[in-house]
Image: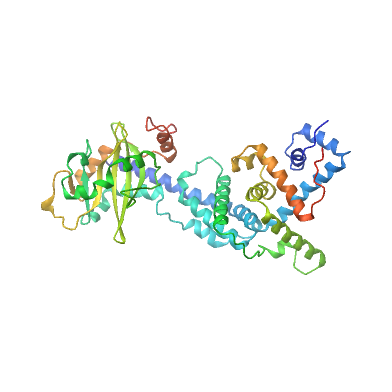
Amino acid sequence: MCQLGLVLISFAMTCLEETDNFRQQMIALLPRLRRFAYSLTSSQADADDLVQAACERALGRQEQFETGTRMDSWMFRIIHTLRIDAARSKRARTSHASFNEEYDSGGAVDGSHTQMEAKLMLDNVRQTMEQLPENDQMVLALVCIDGQSYKEAAETLEVPVGTVMSRLARARIKLNTLLHGDKEMVGAH
Amino acid sequence: MVELTDEKLMAYVDGELDDLETEEVGNALLTNTKAQERINIFKESSTLLRKAYDAPFHEEVPQRLIDGINNYAAPLRLVDRIASWFQVVSWQPVHALAFSMLLLVGIGAGWFAADFSKPERIEYSSLFQGEDFSQGMETALSGVNFNIDDQRASVTPITTFQDQHGHYCRQYEVVRRGNGSSLSSYGVACRTEAGDWLTRVAFLPKPPDFSPGKMQDGYVPASDDELAATIFSNLMAEPPLTITQEEVVIRGGWGGKGEDKQ
């Protein structure tokens, strides 16, 4: 009986260590998770709420995470799922407060014409991003914003690389069209 | 002549082409104005998106998010369940439970098969046996609950292990709701070759009118340490399966051991 107890206590200690590592990995990912959530919501408050909800869901389902696989992909999928769920139940988009006015404007906010133009442009990009379908937002967020390769994005989205490429190309062209108007969109070949 | 599709031009911009393709596209671009415009579109989209959304990556993470992770306590986390299992094994809390819980035992055939006439067994029998119970135990992963008894009770498998005869057994928790309150019970059920799950051991809330004089063979107060220890040591032959092993076993219809057993 004592031996059985020791085995189980040892097992419990291993579980606790894994839990601690799991949480530390998640904390290290927070900057990327916040940026990713921001790209899906374009709202600071909504992004952080989304990240918090995703972390809670992941912690509650820690046993479903397979050690050795990519936690970032897993967390991105959770955020995306939660985002879709929230969008379905509530289509409200509230304030679009920028995360960091100084960063957005490319330096100190002194109201110069160039900086104001840059800020307006980035506001416009965020508003345009919001108009895109969820799938387009997701692939743009993974590749253009998070910097994932096509292969990594395909693994995160659980679709073939070819699907990522076609979806990504269409989304970028669509974004450009919405930003600059409907110019000639004929292929180059 | 390389075909300059949107996907290929985009991959060129993103550095996703191999050296040969990169050179081919680079050469083709020299004489293709439309393709150059396309290239600019793909470049600009990345630049603008990164600028528009990069701020959170450079900011300090709000402390509430970090605290939320560090302080999170999931009520159904497997590790907590296992911790509660250790307590049962060490019998420390059994003393604390002695005045409120009964330990029912029935090693072998399954105690519910023996006699349904006793009031306590009638009261709880629907919670620990039957088609819904067996089906849930057959398919649910640990930590995932299923309902039984016409939705009046929820069963959550806590962990899965093999007994000394190689039979799969699962520890579980039952929460029964009613009259605005809920009562928790715990048990271990083992799988028969026919795929039925029979409870062998259960901790149940003690009926209000229970007295030692009513004790029958088959159930004893939870404070009977020696008997309880013998029962559990006979039941659990080795440490529980991991979730991954559990998934493999469930997918395989409980036919063999989890492949990646650690």
Left or right of residue B111: residue A97: right
The single residue placed furthest to the left in the displayed view is: B213
Q: Is residue B186 visible?
A: yes
**Residue at (29% x, 61% y) in the render:** B179
* Screen quadrant of the N terminus of chain B: top right
Q: Residue at x 80, y 34 (%)?
A: B3
B176 versus A10 height, above or below = below
- Residue found at the far bottom of this picture: A110
Q: Is B67 displayed left or right of B204 in the figure?
A: right
Instruction: Residue lying at the far right in this picture: please name it.
Output: B31
Quadrant holding the C terminus of chain B: top left
Q: Is residue B77 left or right of residue A117?
A: left
- Tell me if residue B61 can be seen: no
Residue A13 is situated, as x and y percent measured from the top left of the image, at 40, 46
Q: Nearer the viewer, residue B193 or B201?
A: B193
Q: Name the colour scheme.
A: rainbow
Q: Residue at x 53, y 62 (%)?
A: B64
Please count the marks in the image. 0
Left-right relation of B45 to B254 = right
Q: Position of residue A79 (x, y in %)?
A: 56, 52
**Residue A42 in the image: above or below residue B26:** below
Residue A59, position as x, y percentages in the image: 48, 51
Observer-nearest residue: A150 or B78? Answer: A150
Residue A28 x %, y %: 57, 52
Task: Give the answer, above or below, for where B94 lies relative to B180.
Answer: above
Quadrant in the rendering for residue B134? top left
